[in-house]
Amino acid sequence: MSDLKVVIEPGRQDIVMTRTFDAPREVVFRAMTDPELLPRWWGLRDTETVVDRYEARPGGSWRIVEHDKEGQEYAFHGVIHDIKAPEGYTGTFEFEGMPGHVLLETHTLEEVDGRTHYTSVSVFQSVEDRDGMAASGMEEGAGQSMDQLDELIRTLV
């Protein structure tokens, strides 16, 4: 059973997500940053995810494209600002369908008793940008991605 929490407080510019995975953080970190593993969990269940590039290093760029059943493409990209295995990483995130609305994400992994507590803090340029992301269905999408990440992690331990 997922313990995913998504906190979207009115008037703030951030979204905070937490979830616990039943695996050591080295395994969770690998699943989250290995370009070969990303397509197995990133995105919606009914889309195909393609990693155009994912350079897991400070200054590295990434671009991921989702393809839906109707042939639509949804592309996302960013830059990794800081990465420290297995503690986490920080980088930007931008949906190419709405250029200029860049957010900064910090992903933190903390191991407690052999399990990994994941925290993601996304900071938006404005409350309006944050509210637009919340209204887009991101909570449902994040839930699907986190469930798929959990399924993948179970195959890696």
Image (cartoon, grey):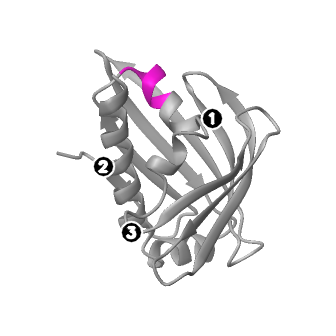
Say whether residue 28 is magenta. Answer: yes
**Is residue 40 placed above or below 156 in the rendered structure?**
below
Q: Position of residue 35 (x, y in %)?
A: 61, 40
Q: Position of residue 89 (x, y in %)?
A: 63, 35
Q: Label 1 amino acid?
A: Tyr
Residue occupying the point 79% across, 40% down: 60
Residue occupying the point 42% across, 64% down: 44
Q: Distance between the residues labelled 2 and 3?
A: 20 Å
Residue farthest to the right? 59
**Is residue 102 placed above or below 157 in the rendered structure?**
below
Name the secondary structure under disc 2. loop
- Closer to the N terminus: mark 3 or mark 1? 3
Q: Mark 2 points at which residue?
A: 4
Q: Label 2 amino acid?
A: Leu
Name the secondary structure under disc 1. strand
Q: The C terminus is located in which quarter? A: top left
Q: Distance between the residues labelled 1 and 2?
A: 19 Å
* Rendered image quadrant of residue 14: bottom right
**Which residue range is magenta in the image?**
24-29
In the rendering, which numbered label is found on residue 89?
1
Q: Name the residue under label 3.
A: 46
Q: Residues within 10 Å of mark 3 (few under 14, many from 20)?
A: few
